[in-house]
Amino acid sequence: MLSSFRLKQLQATLLQILLILIVWGFAYTIQKFLHLPIASGVLGFFILLFLLETQWIRLEQVEHGANLLLTELLLFFIPPVVGVIQYQQLLIISGWKIVIIIFISTFMVMASSMLSVRMLLKQDEVK
């Protein structure tokens, strides 16, 4: 049986995940309403970053939930893998294009993340 402390910790983590999902849902609504050409997950990331920077949300309010989601990230890749298995002909025909897009987009995400972190670290040094 779960101890009272573990139960409270689990409840807090689930509430943090719910808060992250609310931010994503808000981003999804904005993206659909304004017909933005950006994924709602990316928009949600920037909204959450804005909320953390302006301290409308404190890091402690989402930290454990975000860590849990990151540790179980592999589970989020199962549906795409099943899709690849279902559409083998598409992969055979257009696989090289998909691989190029994956490499380019991965590089862009890594580069923008690096530049964002550097920018934020420079801001901290100035303060």
Image (tube, grey):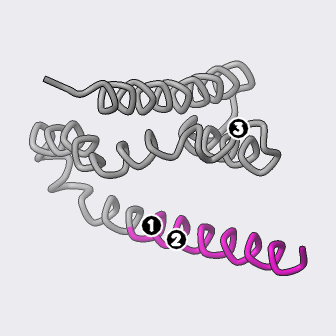
Residue 46 shown left or right of residue 68 in the figure: right
What kind of residue is marked 3?
Answer: Ile
Residue 104 shown in magenta = yes
Q: Are marks 1 and 2 in contact (CB under 8 Å)?
A: yes
Nearest to viewer (mark 1 / mark 3): 3
Q: Are marks 2 and 3 in contact (CB under 8 Å)?
A: no
Residue placed at 80% from the left, 79% from the top?
122
Q: In this view, which residue lies farthest toward the right?
A: 127
Instruction: Give the vertical position of 116 relative to 81 (above or below).
Output: below
Disc 1 element: helix
Residue 8 position within the rendered picture, expressed as x and y whole percent measured from the top left:
39, 26
Residue 5 shown left or right of residue 26 in the figure: left
Dot 2 corresponds to which residue?
110
Instruction: Using the image, tell me which numbered label, if any, was put on residue 57.
Output: 3
What's the distance in space between the residues labelled 1 and 2, CA to CA? 6 Å
**Location of residue 75 by image quarter:** top left
Q: Quadrant of the N terminus?
A: top left
The magenta span reads 103-127
